[in-house]
Image: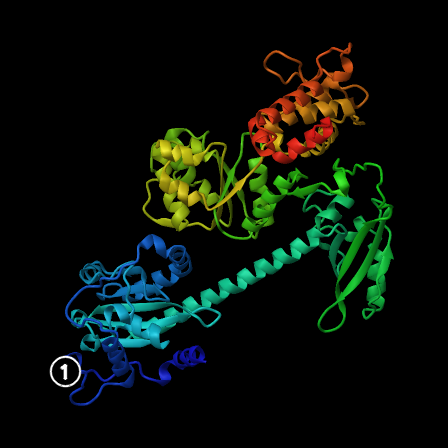
Amino acid sequence: MEKRRARNAWSEGPSWSPTIRRPLYDQWKSFVETGQMRGPKPGVLLLESWKRCREMAVDPSPRSCWDFTPVSQLEPFASHLRELTRDIEKKTYKAIQGKNLLITMTDGKGRVVRTCGDRETLVEAEKLNFGPGANWAESSVGTNAIGTALITGRPVQIYGEEHYCRSHHAWNCCAAPVFDPHGNLWGAFDISGPVSSDFSQIFPLVLSSAREVERLLFTTYLADIEVKSRSLVSAVFDAVLTGVLTVDECGRITHANQAAEALLGQEAGGLRGQRADAFLGFGRYLARQKEDPACAEPMTLSCHVNPRLTVRASPVQAFAGPWKHAIVTLVESHAVHPAPRRDKAGEQPGPAGQPARHFGGVLYRAPVMAQAVHKARQAAQTPSTVLLAGETGTGKELFAKAIHEAGPRAAGPFVAVNCGALPRELVQSELFGYRGGAFTGAVNKGRAGKIEEADKGTLFLDEISEMPLEMQVNLLRPLEERSVVRLGGSQARPVDVKVIVATNRDLAELVARGSFRADLYYRINVVRIDIAPLRERAEDVPLLAEHHARRLCREFRLPFAGIEPAAMDLLVAHAWPGNVRELLNCLEYAVNVMEEGVIRPRHLPSLTDGPGPSLSESPRDRAGGEAFRLENVAAETIREALSHHGGNVSHTARALGIGRNTLYAKMRKYGIY
């Protein structure tokens, strides 16, 4: 109730006067010494503040602020404030520039987070320790506009000798509290300056700035709710095994979950925007709803691309009554352990019916990949910087593109930059662009750099660890302030980009060795997503092998009848040090030499560097009971490792360089218990 009363008092604005009858120095001196007021009393608001200060034993003698919070402890509030109020700060500073005034923004506890103003004023404020980290609550520095506004919940102007502490009598200040969407104190917006400064128009300026901050907080809150709601709906859609589509009144698909995409043989995101009647007998449903918009009965439809599917369309009623959208469900008619089925994309249901899943161009089934994709889907909805960490060939750029396509910037550009391929002397001009005539050979009109080209979209910085150390400092400003200055120019150009960086090296180790900047590392290591190597997700090998073999044959116009089980066994058993990229090269070789559209063990290239069998040497192709068998070697290696580590599966998996789930699968395969 008190919170609401304070909020309403502020919302009344000009109907009450923030200016209080000013006491004389003798009145202030009498009060701080005796607790009694001589002559006419000042306003109730000020008198109550002085009484609070006396009760809290605030020292009124000349002194500077003594209570400081380390600036590092003010994060992430400081980052949020900086991002939220950048335009407000610029606009307000433009209004007070040259007037010997200072803008200050604090958190809800009165701790100064940002200051901005004329240089002379900043220097004077520094003498009072009025800077980032300082505690400007009443309990720290007595009556002042910030502390009093926060404790009363009302905008306040404090002039000269109205301050409780003698050291502040040379200052005037005006502050308004800022409330979050829940009505809680979020911070304060203040303008201060020497008593000689012109404060005639400051109160409405402070009030409007504080209200603008509140508006942005509310907008951010609504956007966050929208993102969470959209993510929740998407998660629910994707969690069910039934295929689900939403179709608008024109017959276009507006949403499809992963199960629907798999059942209809489409890539991730491939159904959205297409006409439903290209896949289903949706025309009958449209005709019925146009004739009888009030009909709420579901209708069974046929499926053109997969007749085995049971398809039902149900209308969704709008608030006004008539139908606007339809929910379409797709279920396989034969759900009792069908034979392995391959759809147009070359996918198969996994063990226990677990379907293959898509995230953009990333195809996966392994739980470790599902965790990475879940984190990536969440990160796609925010402007936060993403760090993709993984070995060479794990598909970091595919992940980056998928994050771009899954987020609100999907319609914007996706600009990829290989930091290791940029010539040292061209790093700045390539990334930041240049002003016309900045150097010999420069285009007269100048040119935008990669960062500007990514405006309203995504900037993907691949192999960030390969950027020369002396050039890394150039990335700090774009990452911190989202602005760039072209080579040879002086004007900062704002850019609205989602930044995704990737590396195949341990950046923390590089920082410790001094070959990567620590400040850059902390700016890019915001949302870290580790992409598992292929050896730790062996269950994905058959899925990827068949999908890409089928794709390659389609591109090369070759027949494809499948991969022989013996060949698939060899693919699964291989460690794939080159990850998915190595697997793709292997498959491309195989489809070039295969016969009758079938990949057999002899069609696989040699993938070993030392002595021993090559990948193409199938155990089934080797004669003799004593022949060297890959399965026997693998089983014996696992037994020896388990024995060495006393049966500890975690230690054994780490020693073999594979994941625990993969080790368990191999133990079951070879009968090791």
Quarter location, residue 197: bottom left
Quarter location, residue 293: bottom right
| Image side of residue 647 versus residue 508, left or right | right
**In terms of secondary structure, where does tag 1 sit?**
helix
Q: Residue shown at 85%/44% (left/top)?
A: 336
In front of the other: 670 or 463: 670
Most distant residue in the bottom direction: 40
In front of the other: 103 or 27: 27
Most distant residue in the front direction: 646
Residue 442 can be seen in this image? no
| Residue that carries the numbered disc 1 in the rendered image | 30
On the image, the x and y values in percent for residue 578 come to: 58, 26
| Image side of residue 161 versus residue 279, left or right | left
Q: Is residue 89 above or below residue 575?
A: below
The three-letter code of the residue at mark 1 reads Ser
| Image side of residue 163 versus residue 384, left or right | left
On the image, the x and y values in percent for residue 74 come to: 36, 57
On the image, the x and y values in percent for residue 631 come to: 71, 21
In front of the other: 229 or 253: 229
Quarter location, residue 262: top right
Q: Is residue 663 above or below residue 282?
A: above
| Image side of residue 20 versus residue 564, left or right | left
Few, some or many C-alpha atoms within 10 Å of disc 1 (few <14, some 14-19, many ≥20)? few
On the image, the x and y values in percent for residue 206 come to: 33, 71
Residue 356 can be seen in this image? yes
Q: Is residue 215 above or below residue 21?
A: above
Q: Residue shown at 35%/62% (left/top)?
A: 89
